[in-house]
Amino acid sequence: MSAKIIDGKAIAQDIRNEIKAEVEQIVASGKRPPALAVVLVGKDPASQVYVTNKRKACHALGITSIEHLLDETIEEKHLLELITKLNRDDGVDGILVQLPLPKKIHEPNILEHIAPEKDVDGFHPVNVGRLVANTPALRPCTPAGVLEMLKRTGIDLPGKKVVVLGRSNIVGKPVATLLLHESCTITTCHSRTCMLNDITKTADIVIAAIGKPKYVKADMIKPGAVVIDVGINRIDEGLVGDVDFENVKKVAGYITPVPGGVGPMTIAMLMYNTLTAYKMRQRG
Ligand code: NDP
């Protein structure tokens, strides 16, 4: 048996096409397109690549991209002033501050300063609270991308046993919460979890978000299970996920590759959130 490969690139392209069509309609009706402001502090090479990819994605979909490239010596109070300005700017729908920030800047201060209705990363405590309460809000991009992938692949979710590996604020906890709202039964594992193999073996769906190359092995997976690999690890042989793809695919029913799985979904969901923020703000 070999698992069906879930093609994140193709699913992400479908989402991008849908967004592009909606933006075209907005512009055709005489309104301005949605606008995303991206703030980058310093010259971290990985962050520069992410910001470039976000700009390209905006341009491809007709979304306005506004970039603020700041020197790493910037004072926290000046960064806060910029966020205040963007919060008040009626022409800006989404604000994204590229992480990580220089050590001397306290990240939570910055993230909590972004207006929740413009928080397209979904990290503001108000949006975290709304996620837990399952009320309308901007959802964090990677977890929302994982859910969208499962739904668009036709995986039936209610009643499924899901094991999430990782409990970070940006992936593990929100993805577990989103799937709980889909009536899955959730187990969240972390670095102190005992007998991990016994737990993962019971799962209908395994979501790996631990940042350990090829950590999830074939003998940890129930035959036919769905395996979603969020991990991105750079090793000598190239980019790999948290799942031992070549061997796990012989056991699983469905599996996402790395690259080409969850990664493209994250940026598609950022574009989706920018459009959603625009529509929410237009409605008032
Ligand atoms: P963090 O480092 O913040 O969290 C890792 C989590 O994994 C922690 O909760 C940790 O447990 C847990 N963990 C570590 N080792 C084990 C283990 N052996 N068994 C079980 N749990 C373990 O990482 P992130 O959540 O930010 O990211 C996870 C991965 O996903 C990374 O590879 C990252 O690059 C990738 N990523 C990919 C994205 C995409 O777009 N595809 C977006 C965001 C992240 P504890 O809490 O006990 O320390």
Image (cartoon, rainbow, N blue to C red):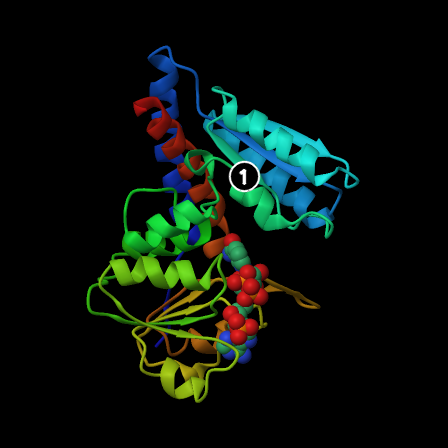
The front one of 213 and 9 is 213
On the question of residue 231 being in view, the answer is no
281 is higher (above) or lower (below) than 163: above
Residue 12: x, y in percent?
Answer: 42, 45
Residue 77: x, y in percent?
Answer: 68, 36
Residue, x 67% and y 68% (percent of image)?
237
163 is higher (above) or lower (below) than 19: below
- Callout 1 crowding tier (Cα within 10 Å): few <14, some 14–19, many ≥20: some
Dot 1 lies on which element?
A: helix
Residue, x 44% and y 20% (percent of image)?
33
Residue 247: x, y in percent?
Answer: 47, 78
On the question of residue 263 being in view, the answer is yes
Can you identify the residue that label 1 sits on? 113
Quarter holding the C terminus?
Answer: top left
Q: In the image, 37: left or right of 149?
A: right
Residue, x 47% and y 68% (percent of image)?
167
Residue 64: x, y in percent?
Answer: 52, 24
Q: In the image, 109: left or right of 224?
A: right
Residue, x 29% and y 53% (percent of image)?
133
Quarter holding the N terminus?
Answer: bottom left
In the image, farthest residue toward the right: 73
Q: In the image, 237: left or right of 85?
A: right
The amino acid sitting under disc 1 is: His
The front one of 15 and 100 is 100
149 is higher (above) or lower (below) than 173: above
The front one of 179 and 231 is 179
Indicate yes or no: mark 1 CB to ligand 1 under 8 Å: no
